[in-house]
Image (cartoon, rainbow, N blue to C red):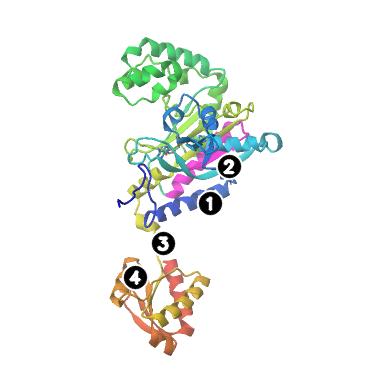
Amino acid sequence: MEKITLPKGTKDIGDPEIFIWYHVENIVRLEAAHYHYIELRTPLFEHTELFARGVGEETDIVQKEMYTFLDKGGRSVTLRPEGTAPVMRSYLEQSFHIHNPRMKYFYMGPMFRYERPQAGRMRQFHQFGFEAIGFQSPAADAEIILLADRIYKKIGLKNIRLEINSLGCRKCKPQYLETLKNYLRNQAAQFCKNCSNRIETNPLRVLDCKNESCQNILHNESFPIIQNFLCDECRTHQNHLIGILESAQIHPVINPYLVRGLDYYIKTTFEMKTEELGAQNAIGGGGRYDNLSDALGVKGIPGVGFAAGMERIILLLQKQSESKAFFQKPFIYLSPLDQQGENVLLKLSIVLDEKSIPFYLDFSDKSLKYHFKNAQRMDASFIIIAGENEHQTKTYTLKNLLSGEQKVVSQKTLIGDLLEAYQNVKNT
Ligand code: HAM
């Protein structure tokens, strides 16, 4: 029979890469706790309508990328392609807008989009995200960006560019869209097929097109950019946000072409980008979505948030740092020579666990040579060998794999010796 392989666009994450994931996840959880954003775990699938209405019928996500199917009860459900609409759904469903309208959430987990897979673009990928719901102030936008910046820095990422834009609000966006459509209609023949189709349905998405001839038209001097259409309220909001960021030594670049692929944004949008990952250069993005609650049936709940792609962060971290630094290794490799040795070392492992000393216990059906090689491969600091003899004499053979020193130690003194050695290794 043929072997069964992974579905395209998915991957197994295990030894050694998983240690980098732990590093990232630990920092995200810690920062969420510092800023008091509370974790919300929403289901992996939702009613399809949530994303159709929340993310927007005309978006690529809804039109082309969703994993949608009928369940056995004939209901249309969708594997979540993103986390913001589910968070807002949960907030509204639990009537927080009535009882406790100001909520700060964080989430971390898999998302699903049927995209063409390539490095940094997966069909099952992972995001961590933060959402502040119920806050109008641009200071909330600033907190979200600051939090993202803190996390990227603590993870150890370098050379990240923050781009921001404003998409205007209910007052100024319609006028911009009309001007944009007129401009695009006049040039329709020169755009790619995709863009010409979008002029009437979702003209903002034309700004995202990577096609060279479309880019040339978009970067023409006469092209109308949203920044020139912002109303006083939107301009003040943006200036206030930039002022706070600048005072925190974060220097955003205004990119008037940054429109993002989800329809719920108004006012602030932003993206964190890197030059080191080729085409998949966004390692996070977000913005303000004061219209999302309207699309889900409750008027006027403001919100702002961001989400980051874990796979892209890990790829970048692998490029920028020594991956080995994140590996967790066993301090002691336990090598039993026979069944008696196994019994002795299993008991010892319980004591090591109580003292929080990391160990790896192998079993006795391999040669001593194999165990030494394996212990070195795992980068253990010590190896303990035990068999019938050690069981009789109540001793262990302990070898320091770094210095080569080998000695026989009594069961009584072993733990004290190891604890001291472990503390020394931890402190260096
Ligand atoms: P998004 O820009 O669609 O925004 O996704 C956020 C991040 O997820 C991207 O910047 C990228 O790093 C990662 N990402 C997206 N698609 C893939 C993929 N196919 N493979 C690997 N990584 C991917 C959102 O999802 C919004 N919900 C963000 C947000 C939160 N806005 C407000 N609050």
Q: CA distance from mark 4 to mark 1?
A: 32 Å
Choose mark 3 or mark 4, whichever is in front: 4
Secondary structure at numbered mark 4: helix
Q: CA distance from mark 3 to mark 1?
A: 19 Å
41 within the magenta span: no
Q: Quadrant of ligand 1?
A: top left
The residue under label 4 is which amino acid type? Ala
Q: Is mark 2 within 8 Å of ligand 1?
A: no
The residue under label 1 is which amino acid type? Leu
Q: Earlier in the sequence, mark 3 or mark 4?
A: 3
The residue under label 2 is which amino acid type? Tyr
133 within the magenta span: yes
Please give the label number shown on residue 375.
Answer: 4
The foreground one among 169 and 84 is: 84
Query: Does the image show residue 57?
Result: yes
Choose mark 2 or mark 1, whichever is in front: 2
Choose mark 4 or mark 1, whichever is in front: 4
Q: Position of residue 142 (x, y in %)?
A: 54, 36
Q: Position of residue 286 (x, y in %)?
A: 49, 34
Q: Position of residue 63 (x, y in %)?
A: 44, 27
Please give the label number shown on residue 313.
Answer: none
Q: CA distance from mark 3 to mark 4?
A: 14 Å
Stretch of the chain drawn in magenta: 127-155
Task: Tell me if label 2 and label 4 are in contact, CB under 8 Å.
Answer: no
Q: Earlier in the sequence, mark 3 or mark 1?
A: 1
Residue named by callout 1: 30
Q: Quadrant of residue 325?
A: bottom left
Q: CA distance from mark 2 to mark 1?
A: 14 Å
Residue named by callout 2: 105
